[in-house]
Amino acid sequence: MPEAKKPAAKTDKAAAAPADSEGSECRDELPDDETVPGGQSELTGLFVERPESTTVIKGKNVTFVAKVDSSDLLRKPNMKWLKGKWLDLGSKAGKHVQFKEAYDRNSKVYTYEMSIIKVVEGDAGGYRCEVTSKDKCDSCTFEVTVEGGSLPGHHCQPFRNLILPLVPFLVPRGDAGEDAGDLDFSALLKKREKKARDEPKEDVDVWEILKDAKPCDYEKIAFDYGITDLRGLLKRLKKMKKVEPKKSDAFLKKLEQCYSVDKGKRTQMHVELHDPNVQVKWLKNGVEIKPSAKYVFECVGNKRTLTINKCNLSDDAAYECVVGEEKSFTEVFVKEPPVTITKLLDDVHVVVGEKVEFECEVSEEGANVKWMKDGVELTKDGKIRIKKDGKKHTLVINEATIEDIGMYYVYTNGGESKGELEVEAKELEVLQSIADLSVKACEQAMFKCEVSDEKVVGKWFKDGVEVKPGNRIKMSHIGRIHKLTIDDVKPQDEGNYTFVPEGYALSLSAKLNFIEIKIEYVPRQDPPKIHLDTSSTGSKNTIVVVAGNKLRLDVEITGEPVPTVCWMKGDTVISEAEGRVRVETRTTLSSFVIEGAERQDEGQYSIIVTNPAGEDRAELTVKIVDVPNPPENVKCMGVGEDTATITWDPPKFDGGAPIKGYLMERKKQGSSRWTKLNFEVFESTTYEAKKMIEGVFYEMRVFAVNGIGISQPSGNSKPFMPIAPTSEPTRLTVEDVTDSTCALKWRPPERVGAGGVDGYIIEWCKEGGEGGFGDLDKNTYRVKGLPTGEKLLFRVVAMNIAGRSPPCTMKQPLTHTIRLPRQLRTKFIRKVGEKINLVIPFQGKPRPVVNWLKDGEPLENKSVGIRTSDFDTILFIRSAERDHSGTYTLSVQIDNMQDKADIHIQIVDKPGPPINVMVTDVWGFNAALEWKPPKDTGNTDITGYTIQKADKKTQDWFTVYEHNRRPSCTASDLVMGNEYSFRVFSENICGLSDEVAFIPIYIPPSDLEYNKPAFKEKDMSSSPKFTAPLVDRVVVAGYSTAISCAVRAYPKAKIVWMKNKMIIGEDPKFLMQNNQGVLTLNIRKPGQFDGGKYSCKAINDLGEDEVECSFSLCPPQS
């Protein structure tokens, strides 16, 4: 990596401002609310080495190094690299910005490096690094200057407010030219006053100096010329230097300097244009952005908006809005939320050799964490494993040792947690200690002990000296038992013997006494006797042992001289002194031991003791009980729609205990996950499994259970599939019939199931008799070879792997029939003059004889045409007349078989006028009329009457009643003294009658005088009240819609529309209308951001009212 160029040493001005002139041009003005840059002092002095301000060539790489001393810190310090006032560069780590850290154990110094790869002009500016550790902190600032061309105005502008407050100003104290830390103005001014008395004063124009000076030199100038109110001076200087900005020809309002957004949120960028019709382009890092679900373009009037949804780190870039030749620049910063620890580590206490697990949970899935112990990062190796499962992170230590004791830490970029590990040494339990021995010369001495751990090894010592094996001395270690055997004991073997297990602060000691006897005596002789007690085992002399357990049977033996003991199983002598099945013999005790009993150890055992005085014998039976063998021959005997019947054979060996029952499990074929079907033992060997999925292959296995435990699982059954027959076929119909054949047609079953349909079976029989069947795989079939002249019944059955479905049977036997269309099954009504064309199909072969009758008589009317084919007949009338009404009978006949169908035709016409219209009464403003129905009803029912009136003066007709069903009415609102004419129309389904019935009426004037009451104006004032509320709406995005409500108020209320409690202003997307109290809000092409709570508020002087609704959008269907 090329070394970054460092600026050459300069005067005090250069020391005070590391920024170059180009950077100063971008920061030549101080805002009113900014403080004057001042010196920055060290807080705690944690930095051993600080990063330095650097000048770097554009396109090169640069690295900054900071070192922190952690010798006085309790935990690892936290380092942050920042650009400007707030931008955390840790969220921008990637190809352009890279970070590295290292730790030196000897010097306890942390080294942090930040590298900027291929520096660009936007990397220029002020930087800061901060280090914190609990209650200590330190920070330092540095600046990067990029050579290779000045920054364009549009890149410099967004960083004006970010860089300026962080530029360090190191002001010299007095004339020493050294960094002074905090600035003490009072002391400095006093010192300058003494010097000023000695030197002659010069007339200097400070304003001219400040105008031409760099902002980084402001403090030095104030110091040199004794200016105390520097802030006020800079405000006045800013007003003097204010320059009118250049106006843009395309933009009324440009983009903001920069935008900041949290990761996963959305952000919007707005510009306003002079020309509302001009097109704009949006660029990201110089590449044009295309509209999508992530990038949404909006155009409202002269306002253009770019919306970025669900921002991620790739959206952290420079953006441009291009209008013709002009551009507006901005930059988007995406902040990634820190990962926090939601579940802290717990302290762990284990014993040596056990597994250790530290577990924590973080706020985000897939986040990276760091595990550390004693400042060293832990990585995966043969002993340590690190697991990550979603938000859960686990540190696993296999076989913990004393060296693993300590504090363990887990770190994220937003938090940390710690947990302490305590490891205790494993305690060794002594099951049998060694005992003191007293032996005679040439006898055998055996020291034996038993400890709890089979893996423990140890050493034997005599009087503090390690015992070595030899010809007479043997040492053995079998399981948990350790033995030291000394053959042909001699006087020098006497002493203290000790067994010391390795790795444990434990020792077992015993003493060996050597006995030398020189007494001659005549030994006493007693016959041997076996003292065997098996009363606690249940049956007499029967011992029951669970397989895998240890059997130790101690038998007391008496007799003089000491009898010889012999153990036998059947005819085989057991003489082993060591091993799984062995015999241990002492003077008066013989022990029979079986380590880890097995099934072959079961049988009849005998013990025989003999001496010169006699013999004794005892028999005993050892029974080994175990879990049973697994069941056998598991198979499926039958299936249903979601059930299966499973059978199996009991196990060949019940383990020596009765079988209590069985446990069943099933799984889907190809899966490794077994599901338990019962938790209570099932005694039978046949089980019906339920709640299965039709069409899925399953496998079953069975466990046998006895008093000892559960057997191994049986072998898996063959895969089977729950399946059921289909439902019956539907819509069985006859499509065609001949003398000896019949074409049938039907629809597939409504419920087919997973087995599908393999085919169909058609069965037929004579009515009241038997027939045959056919097998096929189509939905249509022509049955051949049928008897002629018989009535036949047909049915269809669907077939699949599960068997036959229920049959679909024809309701009536097959004959030659007429298929009357649905519209002809009721009365067929037509108007006079209309055409009639009736097509009536029929079945039958050979061709039937067709006859038409009208009202039981042969049809001889020449205006009625008949045309007949092999499968239908047509009746047509070119112009219908009322005498064509009647009942038409169609008959088809083949030999002695006949079928008939009746068709009722009614020809209707307009009715005649009502008759005998009369005035029955006149009173006040009313007149009562009555009439009789017309003589000619038009061959149909009268549906009503229409009454009209006309004033004699105007002769304009007005309708009084329409569709009046009664032959009478009362006309109201007549004017006294006027003469009226009334006319009445008859009405049926053809319409009003062509002729009418007239009658004149005179309304005489009244002698009554009307007294007009005094007018009292009603108070109509009322507070707003919504009579129709807003209704929740769900609409498709992109389609214009509207929401409406109704309000009543007087005086007229002021209407306010709101979205999410925010008033909707003059937004062209919304159009608000008020029509006679009906309020409507039109929303033009709503987008996904227009959803929410919409409310309407009505306000007047008497009060207010408000209604609200929810407005949701769904994406358009593709």
Image (spheres, rainbow, N blue to C red):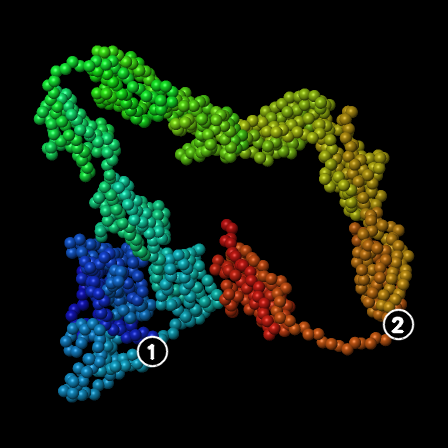
Residue 917 x, y percent position in the rendering: 89, 58
Residue sticking out furthest to the left: 492
Q: Amino acid at mark 1?
A: Val
Query: Which secondary structure, mark 2?
Result: loop
Three-letter residue code for mark 2: Pro
Quadrant (top left/top right/bottom left/bottom right) for the N terminus = bottom left
Residue at x 47%, y 66% (from the top left corner):
277
Q: Is residue 479 above or below residue 556?
A: below
Picture coordinates of residue 703 (x, y %)? 42, 28
Residue 28 vs 656, above or below: the answer is: below
Q: Is residue 581 visible?
A: no
Mark 1 is surrounded, within 10 Å at the Cα level, by few (under 14), some (14 to 19) or many (20 or more) other residues, namely few
* Residue beneath the point at 24% across and 48% down: 378
Given residues 883 and 1061, the one toward you in this image is 1061
In terms of secondary structure, where does tag 1 sit?
A: loop
* Up-down relation of residue 526 to residue 932 (above or below): above
In the image, taking residue 28 as reference, residue 929 lies left or right, namely right
The residue under label 1 is 243
Residue 1077, by quadrant, is bottom right
- How many residues crowd mark 2 within 10 Å: few (<14), some (14–19), many (20+)? few
Label number found at residue 1005: 2
Return the x and y of residue 1006 as percentages of the image width and height. Answer: 88, 72
Identify the residue at horizontal 36%, vertical 66% (top origin). 258
- Mark-to-mark CA distance, 2 and 1: 94 Å
Say whether residue 452 is visible: yes
Q: In the image, which disc is placed on residue 635?
A: none
- Left or right: residue 642 compared with residue 653: right
Of residues 343 and 661, the one nearer the viewer is: 661
